[in-house]
Amino acid sequence: MKSGFAVLIGRSNVGKSTLINNLVGTKVAITTPKPQTTRRPLQGVLTRDDSQVVFVDTPGVMQKSKDQLTSKLLQFIKDSLKDIDMILYVADPTREIGNEEKQTLKMIEPLTQPKLLIINKIDDSRSKMYIDVYRDLGEEQFDKVIEVSALKGLNTNYLKDWIFEQLPEGEFYYPEHAVSNITKEEQLAEIVREKLFLRLRQEVPYSTHVEVDEISNRKDGTLYIKARVLTTEERYKGMIIGLGGRGIKEIGQSTRKELEAMTDKKVYIDLSVKVDPRWIERLV
Ligand SMILES: Nc1nc2c(ncn2[C@@H]2O[C@H](COP(=O)(O)OP(=O)(O)OP(=O)(O)O)[C@@H](O)[C@H]2O)c(=O)[nH]1
Ligand SMILES: [Mg+2]
């Protein structure tokens, strides 16, 4: 048997979470066009015959900033680099190499595990702009370069084959059919957070966190969910709720639609908004 941990690392928005979902074959991580969507090192699992790879999604590396959330996320990234079997560095060739790339490259420099540079978003015509720069970087500092589109699933089978080839001998870490390490409550909270990120502007999404208090099956077959949206400040609370409650209602509706498609059940979701600035401290 073969098994191992493959960590996905890279700056924000390069498509790490989109790629995990593609590789695992189901949505385990949330994805949005906004930076810092991923906040925790979530694991996605892919098992093929007698081999199992555990992908570790990480928050995007962001320029050194003094805010508490960014420093916490950076610590999560550093912790995720311990005890791994390979490094999957994801790059976005529509954007040039900047300080964030340099910071990320420095983090993986001392590591001796196999290093793969994944050049993502090749479906986007703007990827031509910097693709050669990333190809050169790959030649110099990586064991292998693979170009993919996580969104369209281009070349991802080839990518999987390479990953499986690097796996060391070992027992499975998860049951054969597992896809992720997160609980139902955590997955639900993440889906609500995705909808918040998609709807809210500027700094507001970064003030929010979601906690799920109840998931239960009602006698009539509906799935009942009670969740709280937490925000750091009173003024954001109003913005999340929106005029006449329209904002929070839309967030609830889009969450419900996704859950109904996922579970094939009727879903009732009870969402409230609370001011609680201490959620960042509780983030683990
Ligand atoms: N065109 C194109 N867009 C992509 C591709 N992969 C991801 N995206 C888009 O890029 C944006 C960011 O994707 P995410 O998967 O959330 O990126 P991430 O690296 O996980 O970002 P953080 O969690 O914030 O670090 C989303 O709008 C995706 O739809 C791709 O292959 N092609
Ligand atoms: Mg992500």
Image (cartoon, rainbow, N blue to C red):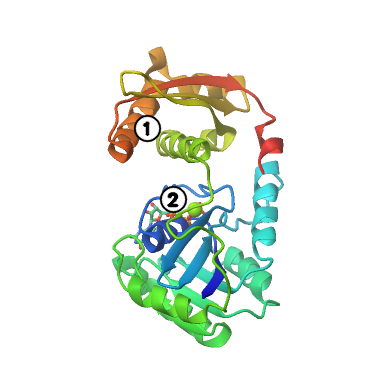
Q: Quadrant of residue 108?
A: bottom right
Identify the residue at image location x=51%, y=87%: 139
- Sequence order check: which comes first, mark 2 or mark 1? 2
**Quick one: 259 or 65, which is closer to the camera?**
259
Q: Is residue 99 left or right of residue 91?
A: right
Horizontal placement of 82 versus 153: left or right?
A: right
Q: Position of residue 274 (x, y in %)?
A: 58, 20
Rendered image: mark on residue 255: 1
Can the viewer see residue 90?
no
Disc 2 vs disc 1: which is toward the camera?
Answer: 2
Report if the CB atoms under discs 2 and 1 are less than 8 Å apart.
no
Callout 1, which amino acid? Answer: Thr
| Residue 118 x, y percent position in the rendering | 45, 73
Q: Residues within 10 Å of mark 1 (few under 14, many from 20)?
A: many
Q: Which residue type carries mark 2?
A: Val
Q: Quadrant of residue 135?
A: bottom left
The dot on residue 28 is 2
Is residue 38 something that shows in the picture? yes
Q: Quadrant of the C terminus?
A: top right
Q: Secondary structure at mark 2?
A: loop
CA separation in Å, label 2 and label 1: 15 Å
